[in-house]
Amino acid sequence: MQKATHYSYSQSCWIVFYPYAIITALWIPLTLFVELYIKDVLIVTLIVDLIATSIVFIQSYRYNNTSIYDFYWQIPGFYLIIYWVFRTPYQPNIWLIIVPFAYFIRHNYNFLSFWPGLTYEDFRYPVFRKKLNNEFIYWIFSYFGLHIGPTLMVYFGLYPTYYALFDSDQEYNQYVFYFGVLFAFSALTIETIADLQLFPWRSKKTEEFIDEGLWKYSRHPNYFGECMFWWGLFIMTLSFGYQYWFTIIGAVIMQSLFLFYSIPEMEKHILRKRPKYYIQQKRVSVFIPWFRNENVK
């Protein structure tokens, strides 16, 4: 493993994007190869997705920075959707493509807007490393928990879209479908506004915390928008029939991730950096935007 902290921004870009260039080049031939032995489209895409994740993991391990994987959350969705579109025998509704593509483009742009290079690693990863206190065990955990795990979450998050694409010949409830589209785009709007409002605060070395815009009514409006988006995909698919109720698994997984892990960990992290944040915890809703309790001082 190599230390990743001394690389310039241009070197960091090369190191990080190199495995993604390999994945892009291999995705189609690898998919065609797997198709020789497996005919189920969902399983084919899952296998290729996991192989691609493993390629990124090698680079994460090589440069001792698990956040090299962070880009992957936004990348494979493009390939999955494109492959499904080419494999479906029907002409899909264009919004089934536009909505997830808008999500992945937004996330890539947002991440690159603040990413400083390989000097950055998500604050949670060093915490795991310290708790495990063993490099070998940490990288086993990183592979399954911080690489494969999130890959499966996004895969299941897109589960509803797969069924909608492959049943595009069916009649669907247009009111429900376009409500889902509006719901998803509203989620992206909330998430984008929240991230733009948060951006100036990322580099502030102060004990003050953001208390403006959407953040006056929710302590995590960006996470609220994120979860809303996955529910939007589910609503869109539900318009094709209630037989697709089981695709709710994607939205439930994402909701659970943020409610039971991401938000609690972020709250602890903020409190360590900004001790007076406990005031905000009493004053502002943790997730769903809601009226403030101004009586707390």
Image (tube, rainbow, N blue to C red):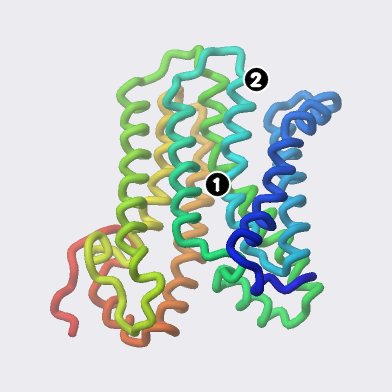
Give the amino acid type for the residue marked by disc 1 in the picture: Gln
Query: Residue 147, relative to residue 160: is it above or below?
Result: below
Residue 128 lies in quadrant: bottom right
- Disc 2 residue crowd, few under 14, some 14–19, many 20+, Cα 10 Å: few
Q: Which mark is residue 250?
A: none
Q: Secondary structure at mark 1?
A: loop
Residue 120 lies in quadrant: bottom right
Residue receiving disc 1: 74
Camera-nearest label, 1 or 2? 1
Q: Residue 215: x percent and y percent?
A: 27, 64
Q: Residue at x 45, y 71 (%)?
A: 266
Q: Residue 262: x percent and y percent?
A: 49, 65
Q: Residue at x 50, y 12 (%)?
A: 169
Q: Secondary structure at mark 2?
A: helix
Q: Residue 28: x percent and y percent?
A: 73, 29
Residue receiving disc 2: 87
Dot 1 or dot 2: first in sequence order is 1
Q: Residue 241: x percent and y percent?
A: 45, 24
Give the amino acid type for the residue marked by disc 2 in the picture: Arg
Give the Cα separation between the discs numbered 1 and 2: 22 Å
Task: Judge left or right: residue 90 versus residue 287.
Answer: right
